[in-house]
Amino acid sequence: MALSCLTRALRSLTLSQPALLSSQTPVVQLKLGTLVASTVSQCRGFLTTASLKHNRAYLKQLDKYTIRPIGIKKSGGRDHTGKIRTRGIGGGHKQKHRWVDFQRLRYEPNKEGQPFEEKVVEVRYDPCRSADIALLAGGNRKRWIVATEKMQAGDIIKTSGVIGRMAVSANEGDAYPLGALPVGTLVNNLEIQPGRGSKYIRAAGTSGVLLRKVNGTAIVQLPSKQQVQVLETCIVTVGRVSNIDHNKRIIGKAGRNRWLGIRPSSGLWKRKGGWAGRKIKPLPPMKSYVNLPSISAN
Amino acid sequence: MLPEATRYLKATVSLFSPNVFLNASKLSAHGAPSSLQTRRNLRVSHCFAARVPPQKKPREKVEIPGLEMVTYGDRMHYVPGLAKPVYPPWEMSFKDPRYYRSPPAQEMALYKDKPCYVFNQRTSILEGVRQAAWLTKTHVRPGLLPHLVSLAAKPENQLPDQDEHVQNAIKHSRFWDTTEPRPRKEKYSNTLLLNLLHLCATLQPTHPAVGRRILAENYSLAATWKRGEDLFQIRGRNGLLHCSMDPLPRICGEQEVLETSDQVLESFYPVSPTIDLQQVSVYKEEMNCTGFRGEYPYPHAHTLYFLETSDPNCQLRPEQFRAKMIMFTFGNALARAHKLYGTQPQSLLERPITVQAVGTNGRIFQFLVFQLNTTDLSGDDGIKNQAWLDEDVELYDFAKVRPFIKRKEVKVPAGLAGYKPETFSKFLALYLHGAA
């Protein structure tokens, strides 16, 4: 069927009007045109494209989760028009994308609602992020998650969505809602809206602190000391993210930066403006991701 | 190619209206076809780059029931303002096998609500031998039984100049079998296996029962069984099969068979035993096939030979390779049992079915002897099947084409090094089991 589409389209191109001299009369053209028009079939346009396999946009369109690494194409900082939108990106070692499941509380199709356990099969390096990733196997499925500091192959990790009356003494690597954890625990992979997947505190060695729990919401301090108020049903993982010495590493040479895909910045000296230099300012106000009816009356 | 292409394909109808041609001023100097307003519908996508333009959402089409849309279908050409006509999908009036689209799974005749878990030759299960043992309700013991191994120690069961012949076989497969510097792994492992089988077959004059066997390749195995509430199937082609006219004798006495009912199968919570198995909703129940039709003169499976595949998608680690051996040996035994005793589960077979298996990667061998005692696999208790697994038996240490030199010292010389004769005697013992 693809071949017939292609041949039909190519036929419509080849049967188009041949090169005519300007001296020819429009009448002749009319005759030729009508002759040709009757024989050429209507054909919808076809796309000449390379395989979409290694396309960064392809990653966003996949719907079935897989643990197999997916090839990605480097963008070089270029956007869809082909111009550089972000400077300093390009080259570097080839990387394969491992699809990490950030929604930790994802039940299997037939086992909704119950806390479940999973086993860590292996913890490995991920080229696409600073933290390590861990392969979890539980029930009938396997998935990648961001590994925590002391996770090792063979551990059993618990995930629960239940908020009990008493706070749970959580082990590192387990995932609980914020309302179930004691105040002061180090947490990572924070969801700001329940069920949307974790967006914060995912980098290597980072951790947030659960500061207090206020009727139905919880306040967490992010690694930047910014405080955030979220619903207490948001799931977090307990512990620090793996690869804690990531910020202490020394690049050592320009070549290592190039292996990471970082191109050199322009060497031109430019006068720095008001944005540069150390700034000492008070913490921004607490950001709330909770729609509390009493506050939003204004 | 087609699904991606159709996702991006926008149906634009090219215009071939004769009114356009009257306009002479449209002529360009060289009279190119573009002057006559032929619109080419070629579009090169941006997929050569890593980022694509953001997708524009098409306008939402609102369906109001009862409201008839005025379409330009009657006028046979596009009219701006009228709706696009929607036609029923065209189907051929006759059946053409070249253009057949299979219906979705729910509409297939063999569709069932309950899924079946299928193990095929490319499956690599996470927990390896433990999971295979749970699925087949088997008690796996390390090491082969001594009376089997002593079978090859008897002088009448040995080849004359056995070591020399085996070493020649290894050298042939690893060094001499190619015009390239070194033969590839799948080639040399295959040649080595065939050479060893040939050597064992030279004992036919002294052991006439060897002549009542034949090798078969690429046969399709199918076996179905129930475990708990789930249905399991083994399907696929595992490789080389040595089949014979006579069944193998039982290895284990009745007393030990009854003792297996006291042993507990290993569980590996939280991983489910069905992990990594292919889930299918369209399957045939009670699919049991030994791979051969009814009148095949060599119906009893004697030994299965497994080689490592060269397919990069299913590279099996040693643990998973042994698990595959166990599963296919069990499948052969179960298919035979279903044929002899029927598909009703039986808690104790009066004649247990024994099947052997040998797996190799060209240097390291895995030997397996499996005895099927029961076809009642639904519960976890009761009599279990037995398997004796000899793991990672090396035939030789190194077979280097060029010597391995480190810091100007020859660590491993070229040629065959570290030959172990016991491995071939085990191989021969498994071959002669049932014949001598």
Image: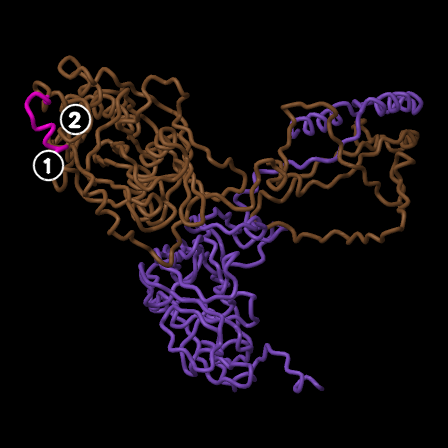
Chain colours: A purple, B brown
Q: Position of residue A31 (x, y in %)?
A: 90, 21
Q: Which stretch is magenta?
A: B147-158
In magenta segment, residue B154: yes
Drawn side of residue B25 relative to residue A154, left or right: right
Q: Is residue A226 above or below residue B432?
A: below
Q: Position of residue B427 (x, y in %)?
A: 18, 29
Q: CA distance from mark 2 to mark 1?
A: 34 Å
Q: Count the labels in the image.
A: 2
Q: Amino acid at mark 1?
A: Val
The quadrant of the rendering that contains the N terminus of chain A is top right
The chain to which mark 2 is attached is B
Q: Earlier in the sequence, mark 2 or mark 1?
A: 1
Say which element carries label 2. helix
Q: Position of residue B343 (x, y in %)?
A: 41, 35
Q: Position of residue A282 (x, y in %)?
A: 52, 87
Q: Amino acid at mark 2?
A: Leu
Q: Residues within 10 Å of mark 2 (few under 14, many from 20)?
A: many
* Residue marked by disc 1: B410
Residue sitting at x 65%, y 51%:
B53
Say which element carries label 1. strand
* Residue marked by disc 2: B428
Q: Residues within 10 Å of mark 1 (few under 14, many from 20)?
A: few
Residue B289 shows in this picture: yes
Question: Of all residues shown, which one is farthest toward the left?
Answer: B155
